Image (cartoon, rainbow, N blue to C red):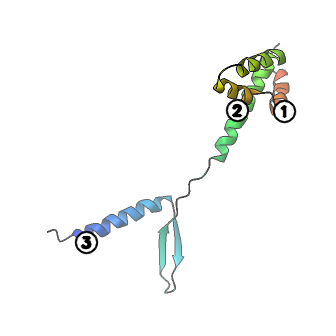
Amino acid sequence: MQPNVPFDKRLKEISRRHDKMARGAVRKVNADGLIVARPRAYRPRFPLKGLLVVLAIGFLFKGFLFAYLGETAYAERVAGLQAGSTMEQAGAWVMQPDPATLAVASLLQTILPE
């Protein structure tokens, strides 16, 4: 038998709590005045900034295509997607010109050569 089994078990628990506290700790003062640190509860956060960046890049891309191809050619390509498979129809729904796309396209038409 190993005489250090309880010690090793306590040491393992301390290491586990220390790893959990790497994300942060909440400290509370007990009634007897002892300050106790506990690991912060893990709550995954939704990457809102990343989602907004992806949406902005998507609208810029749609606006660029609309400005570069022109309204009729863009409409023909979206109609071609609508006649395709389910995935192509979903792409056609996403690529439909909306007010944000038209606004970006009008801004980009001043920059793009004709």
Can residue 17 be seen in the rendering of this structure?
yes
Mark 2 Cα within 10 Å, few/some/many (few <14, many 20+)? few
Residue found at x 81% / y 24%: 108
45 or 112, nearer to the observer: 45
Above or below residue 70? Residue 43 is below
Q: Position of residue 13 (x, y in %)?
A: 35, 66
Report the disc number at residue 57.
2
Mark 1 Cα within 10 Å, few/some/many (few <14, many 20+)? few
Q: Quadrant of residue 54?
A: top right
The CA span between labels 1 and 3 is 68 Å
Residue beneath disc 1: 99
Which amino acid, by three-letter code, is at mark 2? Ile
Q: Quadrant of residue 111?
A: top right
Above or below residue 68? Residue 12 is below
The CA span between labels 2 and 3 is 57 Å
Nearer the camera: disc 1 or disc 3: 1
Residue found at x 72% / y 30%: 94
The reply, left or right, for residue 34 in relation to residue 96 is left
Residue found at x 31% / y 69%: 10
Q: Position of residue 31 (x, y in %)?
A: 52, 86
Residue beneath disc 3: 6
